[in-house]
Image: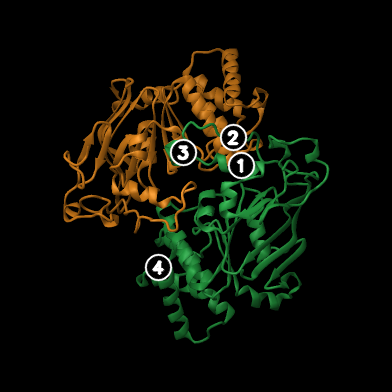
Chain colours: A green, B orange
Amino acid sequence: MSQPLIQTKDLKKYFKTPYGDLHAVDSVNLTINKGQTLGVVGESGCGKSTLGRVILRLIEATDGEILYEGKNILEYNKKEIRNIRKEMQIIFQDPYASLNPRMTVSELIQEPIIVNKTIKNKKEVEQKVYKLMETVGLAQRLINTYPHELDGGRRQRIGVARALSLDPKFIVCDEPVSALDVSIQAQILNLMMDLQDEMGLTYMFITHDLSVVKHISDEILVMYLGQCVERAPSNEIFKNPLHPYTKALLSAIPVPDLRYKGKKREIIKGEVTSPINPKPGCRFTLRCPLANAECTGTDFALKEVRKDHFVACKQI
Amino acid sequence: MSDKLLDIKDLHVIYETEDDTVRAVNGINLKIGKGETLGLVGETGAGKTTTALSIMGLLPIGAGKILSGEIIIENRDILKFTEAEMRHIRGEKISIIFQDPMTSLNPVLTVGEQIAEVLELHKDLDKNGIQKRVDEMFELVGIPAQRKHEYPHQFSGGMKQRIVIAMALACDPELLIADEPTTALDVTIQAQVLDMMDELKQRLNTSMILITHDLGIVAQTCDKVAIMYAGEIVEYGTLEEIFEGENHHPYTVGLFGSIPSLTKETKRLSPILGLMPDPADLPKGCKFHPRCPKCIEKCKIEEPKDVVNGTHIIKCHLYNINNFK
């Protein structure tokens, strides 16, 4: 089996608010092996984006450990983190908001190279830009265009090229396709999978779209209000979801197949509760069909129910 | 099948800007029966919302223009209506639910007042009657009626969308247009809202046009499906014909190939190559030909006609009366 590239241990991020601590990420343990993809799913506000940013130290963690190739990067100083960040990149959700409108495609793609001084010769930088554009499927004639002249799919290709410009090993993909139309979404997903095969990249793929995550991931982590409620290999979680929240999430997706029409779906009632000062115990209790007195009162950890399949639920 | 409620004939809509003419809708024909749900599917810029706004008479004044066509509701062409006549049926006979519930409610009025407004305009009810009806609407969409005195910011996204739906249904409209009603919501909330809409539709026998890009939602809720591309309906049929039939427009095939499946294992997606054409500069012939894997010479020159087989219509040169059965 391959080596773990990223590991987190009891990773926590609490935000201070006037009403108390907002538990955005609460004791998350995960491992991503080299060349693999971990899919992180959950609804808005469950802390999935925060988790991605905390791992890159774009947001400072409150507590816990982040091991990158075995070393705890939370102990790194500014200079060390700068060096390591060349190997850890991010692709953002909204290609309309994440690109500087006053920079051309060429300036956007070479910016990381210039900031990090990885290539100093101007000619070589230019060659690298052309090479990156070719890798992500941008036509050379677009080199001097501005983002507003391009459509969402092409803009997201610039985002991918920027992330690749420093030859990273690990990329956090924060909903990279949710702002795109389905036909364009499929093009970008194919591109990302090809790049992974060619360059041996490791992805952490954050999304709310379960069919996308199934397609691209090796392992899936389901989050609810800052906690990981279930973690399992991709096939296993779709064949055999155990946590009531995962089940509800899966049955809520409308399937484009008539055999599923009229099938009574398990719909969970209510909405996501506040992540500010949550009570100990399972945070899904209020919406859970299986909940009883056992579920509240004390926190409980993930347990391995089957090989590599972890669930945090008292009823299983 | 059932009686015809809405009949759109050869509708052309353009947007005029200073330098360009954007051809948003290019000759579409649509029929909707009473109690029927039509799914209008397509990507950004396909003309779905423009079609909806044309039916509502809400095209942006100045820029949007209906060039030709008819929109017939109950044997009357509403395109010939004056603004006053239009205002009379808008909200009462036809109503619309917009995509984003966060922006379609007025933040300075209580939600109860906003539902009451529709009733004051259209129904001959006294104050008590209106309040009674408002309470009924809240119950209908599953929100306790005592919350009618609250403001939109006090509700979550799913609740706001329920309120918008209550507002749209307050006058028992015959046609409800839902423009991506659940796109802004999380999946579990989306499932709640879709379920509720389905139940209400059956109870009230309302016809519905559901605009969406999600084929999963179409499969769960619609009776008929129209696939739109570059302002045209390229394929139309019953749910079975679109999802299980053998013959399809190449664009429909591309759309289905682009969605990662939850039920089947696919190694690679087969997306449609290229991009949506610029609606200000549409290609000649078939508008899909630059992206079509099955394009032949004829497609580049001549615009295809509708090929009809019962209820199933495909607008493509690959089909004719002999091979499309």
Query: Above or below — where is B161 with respect to B287?
Result: above
Depth check, mark 2 against mark 4: the one in front is 2
Query: Above or below — where is B215 with respect to B130?
Result: below
Q: Are marks 2 and 1 on the same chain?
A: yes
The amino acid type, in three-letter code, at marker 2 is: Glu
Query: Does label 2 or label 1 sit earlier along the sequence?
Result: 1
Depth check, mark 3 against mark 4: the one in front is 3
Q: Are marks 2 and 3 on the same chain?
A: no
Depth check, mark 2 against mark 3: the one in front is 2
**Furthest-bottom residue in this view:** A121
In the picture, the disc for residue A266 is: 2
User: Which sits in the foreground, A74 or A109?
Assistant: A74
The amino acid type, in three-letter code, at marker 3 is: Ile
Instruction: Say what secondary structure mark 2 lies in.
Output: loop
Cα separation between marks 3 and 1:
19 Å
Q: Are marks 2 and 4 on the same chain?
A: yes
- The picture places residue A71, in percent across and down from the top left corner, at 72, 73
- Name the residue carrying label 4: A137
Cα separation between marks 3 and 4:
32 Å
In the picture, the disc for residue B217 is: 3
* Label 3 chain ID: B
- Name the residue carrying label 1: A247
